[in-house]
Image (spheres, rainbow, N blue to C red):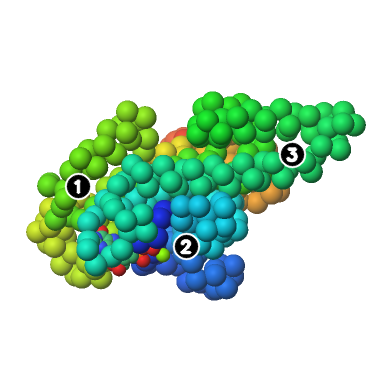
Amino acid sequence: MSLSIGIVGLPNAGKSTLFNTLTNHSVPMENYPFCTIDPSVGVVSVPDSRLEKLSKFSNSKKTINATVSFVDIAGLVSGASLGEGLGNEFLSHIKSTNAIAQVIRVFDSKDIIHTEGSVSPLRDLDIISTELSLSDLYIIEKYLSKIEKECKKGDKEALFEKEVLTKAKKNLEENTKLTEDKYEKNEAFVFNKLGLISSKPFLYVLNISASEKKDPQNKDEYEKIIKYLKDKNLDYIELDAKTEHEIKDETDSAELRKTFEMDAFGVEVFIQKAYKMLELITFFTTGEEETRAWTIRKNTNIKDAGSAIHEDFKTNFKKADVITTNDLLKQKSYSEARDLGLLRTEGKNYIVSDGDVIVFKI
Ligand SMILES: Nc1nc2c(ncn2[C@@H]2O[C@H](COP(=O)(O)OP(=O)(O)O)[C@@H](O)[C@H]2O)c(=O)[nH]1
Ligand SMILES: [Mg+2]
């Protein structure tokens, strides 16, 4: 799989600024034809020092990083579900993403208008959640009427979907997110099928000026949102999108970061956080031709992991040789590792670990 993250938030929250910062080191567009038509999709490589080392180790001709795509959307405003602004049709652009980053404005600036008239992060978080829920409710209702006929006929699958979606509808009406831990896997599958945004993992991005961090202009508002996020155990990061954007190309960005007392940030930190949140891990394939990183979910068996590479690997999987990156890099060559008996032969039920180097035998 290739991770994709949709960026949402009110106008002037800093979405595009963040998007431009994250996609600064975009991989060449020609590799991703779907991007050339859509300037709001950016594909970036996932930085991984292990990959570089493995590539050197194998003297590979090519090094291929895992990728993450970001989708920047505009137009979500309060009342979008009722047709305000551009309406919420454009949300379909983020239907198929794996996760959502919600940008929330904490920075104060008289020059940049706030569509709601004042800076209030928690209110904004709520506005966006409500709009997304309403959009999902609309999708659910439309789908429920579509499957009504099948339900009447007693179609098992349709009846199951109806049951799940009716429960989801109730939760959304009560303003409860459709997060995975509350639902069974086969229930969450229905949400995925419909592309319900409220069922996706959320990362909240507080856009706060570095200069304000110690003493925010809207201290009460700032404390209110932090308390809310912590109490609910939600994933969030704080960053200064504008300054990050301004210093991204400066050679002395590390110095500037110190001057502004900014935490380390970059696409690395953002992606690491997303990987952790989504429980994603990386395995590698390496050889003279290429060394490549692959993204899979934690607890995936090796047979399914293989299908990330090629569908055939799933059907024709026999066994695989596995070694950890660390163990391999301690040797002089792959064949030396083999001679020393450091390679493990694993069958189809082996659960892949982060950093495994795998040779599939089919
Ligand atoms: N002062 C300040 N301005 C910001 C910050 N982040 C974004 N902006 C500015 O706010 C305006 C809107 O930003 P943009 O990224 O286009 O917001 P979007 O509508 O959410 O995509 C731009 O002029 C940005 O330069 C910030 O952290 N501090
Ligand atoms: Mg924008």
Residue drawn at point x = 60 percent, y = 29 percent:
170
Say whether residue 117 is left or right of residue 191: left
Q: Quadrant of the C terminus?
A: top right
How far across and down, in percent of the image, does residue 276 sit? 40, 39
Is the residue at mark 1 in contact range of ligand 1, meaning its CB lies under 8 Å from it? no
User: Which residue corresponds to mark 3?
Assistant: 144
Query: What is the secondary structure assignment of the residue under circle 3?
Result: helix
- Going from N to C along the chain, the mark reached first, 2 or 1, is 2
User: Which residue corresponds to mark 1?
Assistant: 218
- Going from N to C along the chain, the mark reached first, 3 or 2, is 2
Residue drawn at point x = 50 percent, y = 34 percent:
175
Query: What is the secondary structure assignment of the residue under circle 1?
Result: loop
Crowd tier of the residue under label 2, counting other residues whose Cα lies within 10 Å: few below 14, some 14–19, many 20 or above: some
Front-most of residues 258 and 129 = 129
**Up-down relation of residue 164 to residue 213 (above or below):** above
Query: What is the secondary structure assignment of the residue under circle 2?
Result: loop
1 and 3 marks in contact (CB < 8 Å): no
Instruction: Give, as a three-letter code, the residue at label 3.
Output: Leu
Give the CA distance from mark 2 to mark 1: 26 Å
User: Which residue corresponds to mark 2?
Assistant: 74
Instruction: Give, as a three-letter code, the residue at label 2.
Output: Ala
Is the residue at mark 2 in contact range of ligand 2, meaning its CB lies under 8 Å from it? yes
Q: Is residue 110 visible?
A: yes
